[in-house]
Amino acid sequence: MHSSLIHKFTLLNDDTSVKSTYQSYRTDTPQNSPDLILFNILLTYFLRTKQSHDSLHTLHELDKHDLSPDSYTATAVIYGLVQNGETASAEPTSLRLLRNKIPLSIHAVTALITGLSHNRDAIGMMRWIRAILLPYPPFQIPRSSLEELAALSRVPVEDVPTLLNQHAEVLGQLSGIVPDYKFYSTCVIGFLRTCALECADAMVRYMVEHRVDGVQDGRVLVLMDRVCAAWNRCGKEDRGESLRELCTKESK
């Protein structure tokens, strides 16, 4: 009851009611320890409303009640960091969560991809994308994309594979997470944001060739249009036409 009531107040952004209801719950029902659902609701709210002190206090309370964070907790943390502009902390925090055996959801990884794209970290994006897609048909990075990643990151192209394989042991824990259209679209848009046009093109081609979520219902065509428009702005209309031909043919 208290969890649902607090959730209602968080949706209304009623800060006073959120905190007073939680305090009354702790006072009135000391024999009933708060559960993980309640803490996840509070953490999500405090992170969304940029209340860092209360966010840290909630995490301390979680530990105090001997509750183990789950994927919902992790999602709240990563999403909150990215939404609050603390994008540089998103990847180190995600890796720390995985090392502590706290699972990440596809929503947490999607939020992380957004953060990495805002940091112009195309190699970081590709590192996590490859880890997610490893159990599926692996994402084979074309040579043109490797060269693009090297140019954007200002490193020799022969160093890119080493950078992509960083944290491989930890990222292996992502095996089994099912990617959805939101994940794929975030990857494509993120690559466009970082000016990694070859990577965005390769991502759309992967989606179409493997008929992932968003292909049969035509949503992939929205991403195709954005990539084609980017090719056109670069004066490479032939690349856009090639992608459009593939998408139109395979999405029928």
Image: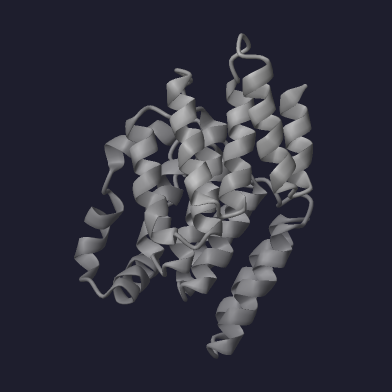
Q: Where is residue 7 in the image (x, y as percent from the top left)?
A: 74, 36
Residue 179 in view of the camera: no
Residue plotted at (32% across, 36% down): 170
Where on the picture, by quarter, is residue 60? top left
Residue plotted at (51% across, 56% down): 82
Residue that protrudes farthest toward the top in the picture: 31
Nearer-the-camera pick, 121 or 30: 30
Q: In which quarter of the image is the C terminus?
A: bottom right
Where on the picture, by quarter, is residue 204? bottom right
- From this view, report whether residue 63 is shown above or below residue 231: above
Relative side of 200 to 27, left or right = left
Relative side of 105 to 101, left or right = right
Where on the picture, by quarter, is residue 180? top right
Residue plotted at (64% across, 46% down): 212
Query: What colour scheme was applied to this rendering of the protein?
Result: one colour
Residue 4 in view of the camera: yes
Residue plotted at (43% across, 40% down): 134
Q: Position of residue 160 (x, y in %)?
A: 26, 61
